[in-house]
Image (tube, rainbow, N blue to C red):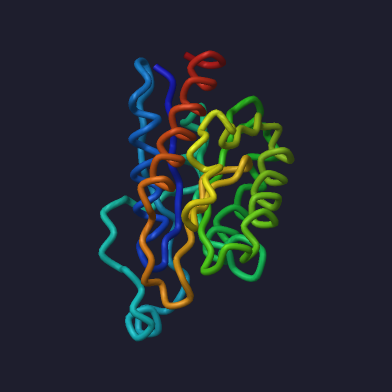
Amino acid sequence: MAKVLVLYHSTYGHIETMAGAVAEGAASVEGVTVDIKRVAETVPEELAKASHYKLDQAAPIATVDDLKDYDAIIIGAGTRFGTVASQMRAFLDQTGGLWFTGALTGKVGGAFTASATQHGGQETTFQGIHNYFLHHGMVVAGLPYGYQAMMTLDTVEGGSPYGATTITAGDGSRQPSEIELGGARYQGKHIAEITKKLHG
């Protein structure tokens, strides 16, 4: 069985929802098992509560050593000023030991993200995460244009060849649309299929 990890950080629940859709798509591939885990919140609890963070998330907290156990790692986190959220960066910065031993070499990596606005730094966020995968010797997979729904101009939608995305609005009021969730499922399935070919 090929093993896929969906690893995420979600402040207000948007990325948590997207992570569920990515996992659903990956799990639809026969011979693939999927786990969803999240990275630890680094914001002090009092501040997180005062800022209305979504703290009731069911996914267990991941450890760095967990990454060795999977054939694919799909990372989701929000965009912060054109780069990935600091909570995810803090987790990834602890993987130097895995890099030193080549523990992630040959695994498949993919990413998904969110921003408040249509052009809020999503592509530069992907670039940073993809750089991480490449430094670990991983194979990078995005969201192919085979998912043609992301090409619509009829409504405001996320979606990128670099990975699934959602747009949250400045106040966080916009939830992932069906097109965006469909992109997340498509990407999850796409990565799982590649992983199965390489590691199944």
User: Viewer-proximal residue, 126 or 37?
Assistant: 126
> How many marks overall?
0
Q: Is residue 78 above or below residue 135?
A: below
Q: Is residue 59 above or below residue 79?
A: above
Residue 26 x %, y %: 40, 30
Residue 28 x %, y %: 33, 25
Q: Image check: 131 left or right of 4? A: right
The residue at 40%/53% (across/down) is 38
Residue 98 x %, y %: 63, 40
The residue at 48%/39% (across/down) is 149
User: Viewer-proximal residue, 79 or 132?
Assistant: 79
User: Viewer-proximal residue, 134 or 42?
Assistant: 134
The residue at 32%/69% (across/down) is 54
Q: Outermost residue, front direction?
A: 154
Q: Image check: 46 left or right of 189? A: left
Q: Quadrant of residue 91?
A: bottom right
Q: Quadrant of residue 14?
A: bottom left
Residue 64 x %, y %: 51, 47
The residue at 45%/33% (across/down) is 186
